[in-house]
Image (cartoon, rainbow, N blue to C red):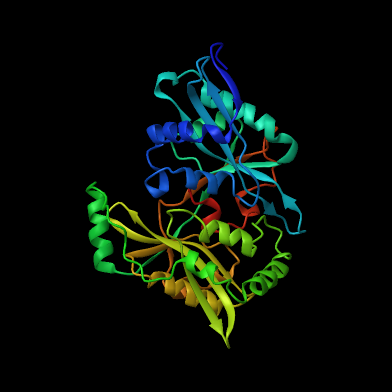
């Protein structure tokens, strides 16, 4: 750290200044406006734990940079919890750029979380990936995205507009799917049983996956301020056999339904297909999701019209807090949902 700057732990009283810096450096984020409520939901109410964070500060108390890690736990095939963090919400004030603040805060925060975390992962873009690689991250590959075009004419017009670099549409997409917030407010019946059955079956899968609980799903999709998550459900004989979460959003000129999560009973490809079709019929130009290999949704995808889109997806990079990632932690070692990797 530069001699005229010190670094310290992020405190809740720093939130207004941090939001101002993040907005100045990264604009309004996924909701369009960075609010204290969203920041508290993300970094303080996370069921995996509060986000560790560091600030770089001048002697006068001016914030020069900020670095936060979002906690995100995984479970392996033996049911063991793998404590992890995801680097998020990083900014350096323009007056202090080029002084190594990003690197120093990152390395110091890695050292801080090393006693209680064993994995660090994120999806850096092309501009930030080289910096992460220099700090010990390993590029694992691209997590593919599958698309289902719902409104061919509108999709074609939007794609042409995007290629022509026309401005993004500002209005929110039309969506005819109930909100996740309202669904969770009803204390949905059958969800704990569905998740318990799913978790028991998933123990046979050695890949790392997030342990879904009603509390986690309610926080992630029901309580997220300003993200407008919706819920899709399917039942058989009055029993819940599947649930999915997604949100309508703008992708430049296109209206996209981003399908973040699909959860069905083990082996129930029929419910997975119903949920995939319902996502495509939500009212947007297309639906987009990640379908982890070996899942019911992946097996049902082709007959539901979902195709892997070329030149799309997110680059996964990872390391441990103390050094390189073990060789056996490849891209195939994870079972992701899009909600695990979506930037929010």
Relative to residue 132, is residue 31 depicted above or below? below
Q: Is residue 53 above or below residue 290?
A: above
Residue that extends furthest to the top in the rendered view of this protein: 3
Q: Position of residue 183 (x, y in %)?
A: 51, 70
Q: Quadrant of the N terminus?
A: top right
Q: Nearer the viewer, residue 151 or 140?
A: 151
Name the spot of residue 118 as percent of width and height, x first. Answer: 71, 41
Task: Please indicate, yes or no, whether residue 264 appears anywhere in the rendered image.
Answer: yes
Residue closest to the eye, 306 or 258: 258
The mark tally for this picture is 0
Outermost residue on the front side: it is: 13
* Residue plotted at (27% across, 52% down): 170
Q: In this rendering, is residue 170 above or below 183? A: above
Instruction: Describe residue 62's horizontal placement relative to residue 46 as left or right.
Output: left
Q: Quadrant of residue 135?
A: top right
Spot the residue most to the bottom: 237
Residue at 42 percent of width and 52 percent of height: 312
Identified at 45% across, 75% down, the residue is 303
Instruction: For residue 323, say whether it is visible.
Output: no
Location of residue 134 in the rendering, given as x and y in whole percent from the top left corner: 56, 28
Residue shown at 40% from the left, 23% from the top? 94
- Residue 17, x across and y down, in percent: 46, 31
Q: Image height check: is 274 above or below 94?
A: below
């Amino acid at each position: 750290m530069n001699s005229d700057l010190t670094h310290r732990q992020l405190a809740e009283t720093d939130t207004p200044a941090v939001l101002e810096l993040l907005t100045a450096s990264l604009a309004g984020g996924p909701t369009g406006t960075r609010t204290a409520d969203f920041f508290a939901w993300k970094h303080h109410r996370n069921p995996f734990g509060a986000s560790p964070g560091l600030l770089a500060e001048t002697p006068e108390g001016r914030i020069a940079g900020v670095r936060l890690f979002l906690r995100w736990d995984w479970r392996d095939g033996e049911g063991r919890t793998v404590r992890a963090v995801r680097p998020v919400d990083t900014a350096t004030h323009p007056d202090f750029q080029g002084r190594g603040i990003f690197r120093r805060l990152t390395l110091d925060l890695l050292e801080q979380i090393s006693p209680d975390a064993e994995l660090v992962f994120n999806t850096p873009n092309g501009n930030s990936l080289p910096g992460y690689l220099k700090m010990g991250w390993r590029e694992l590959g691209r997590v593919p995205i599958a698309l289902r075009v719902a409104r061919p004419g509108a999709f074609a017009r939007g794609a042409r507009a995007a290629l022509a670099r026309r401005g993004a549409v500002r209005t929110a997409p039309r969506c005819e799917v109930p909100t996740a917030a309202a669904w969770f407010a009803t204390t949905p019946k059958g969800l704990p049983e569905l998740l318990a059955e799913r978790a028991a079956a998933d123990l046979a899968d050695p890949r790392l996956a997030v342990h879904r609980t009603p509390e986690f799903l309610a926080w992630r999709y029901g309580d997220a301020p300003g993200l407008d998550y919706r819920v899709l459900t399917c039942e058989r004989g009055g029993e819940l056999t599947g649930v999915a979460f997604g949100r309508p959003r703008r992708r430049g000129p296109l209206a996209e339904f981003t399908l973040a999560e699909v959860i069905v009973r083990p082996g129930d490809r029929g419910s997975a297909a119903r949920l995939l079709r319902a996502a495509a019929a939500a009212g947007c130009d297309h639906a987009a999701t990640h379908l982890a290999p070996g899942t019911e949704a992946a097996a049902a995808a082709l007959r539901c019209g979902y195709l892997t889109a070329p030149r799309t997806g997110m680059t996964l990079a990872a390391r441990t807090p103390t050094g390189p990632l073990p060789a056996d932690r490849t891209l195939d070692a994870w079972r992701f949902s899009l909600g695990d990797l979506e930037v929010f």
